[in-house]
Image (spheres, grey):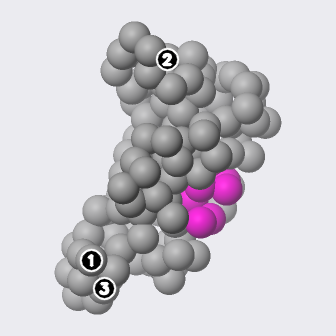
Amino acid sequence: MGVRAIRGAIQVEANEREAILAGVTELVTEVMARNELTTDDVISVIFTATPDLNAEFPALAARKLGFHDVPLICATEIDVPGALPRVVRLMAHVETDKPRQQIQHVYLRGAVALRLDIAQ
């Protein structure tokens, strides 16, 4: 069993609690499904949000999905002028037998533009 990092991001509709929770729920669900993971496989998850998103902690969506004993942390993304607004990013550290080349990084909605090279 190896340890891998999985990246993902989603652009949410608005700085509103429900929009943030819905977007992060969609992102986490896709990361888990595409990589055939359960919460037992997840070591930790780091969430970042652009400075224009502060209506809710992104980690709350993961808690609601069953990440009760997984260490989660939220941080603010660097405020780069001209950067894509309303984006939540994640980096999940997981245990998996998959080689690095088979890891599915997930970029959804407008966040696809962040990594056209790896977005599916």
CA neighbours of label 1 inside 10 A, class few (<14), some (14 to 19), many (20+):
few
Please give the range of residues in magenta.
24-30
Q: Mark 1: which amino acid? A: Gln
Q: Residue furthest left?
A: 2
Q: Nearer the viewer, residue 35 or 92?
A: 35
Q: Say whether residue 113 is magenta.
A: no
Where is residue 47? Give x, y as percent.
44, 42
**Residue ID for mark 3:** 98
Relative to residue 117, is residue 30 depicted above or below?
below
Farthest residue toward the top?
A: 81
Q: Secondary structure at mark 1?
A: helix
Separation of residues labelled 2 and 3 (CA atoms): 34 Å
Q: Nearer the viewer, residue 73 or 49?
A: 49
Residue 20 spot, x, y in % from top left = 68, 36
Q: Nearer the viewer, mark 1 or mark 2?
A: 1
Q: Is residue 3 visible?
A: yes
Q: Residues within 10 Å of mark 2 (few under 14, many from 20)?
A: some
Magenta highlight on residue 28? yes
Which amino acid, by three-letter code, is at mark 2?
Pro
Q: Is residue 87 left or right of residue 90?
A: right
Residue 11 in the image: above or below residue 120: above
Give the label on residue 101, or none. 1
Q: Which mark is residue 51?
A: 2
Residue 112 is labelled as none
Q: Position of residue 46 (x, y in %)?
A: 38, 46
Residue 74 drawn above or below residue 35: above
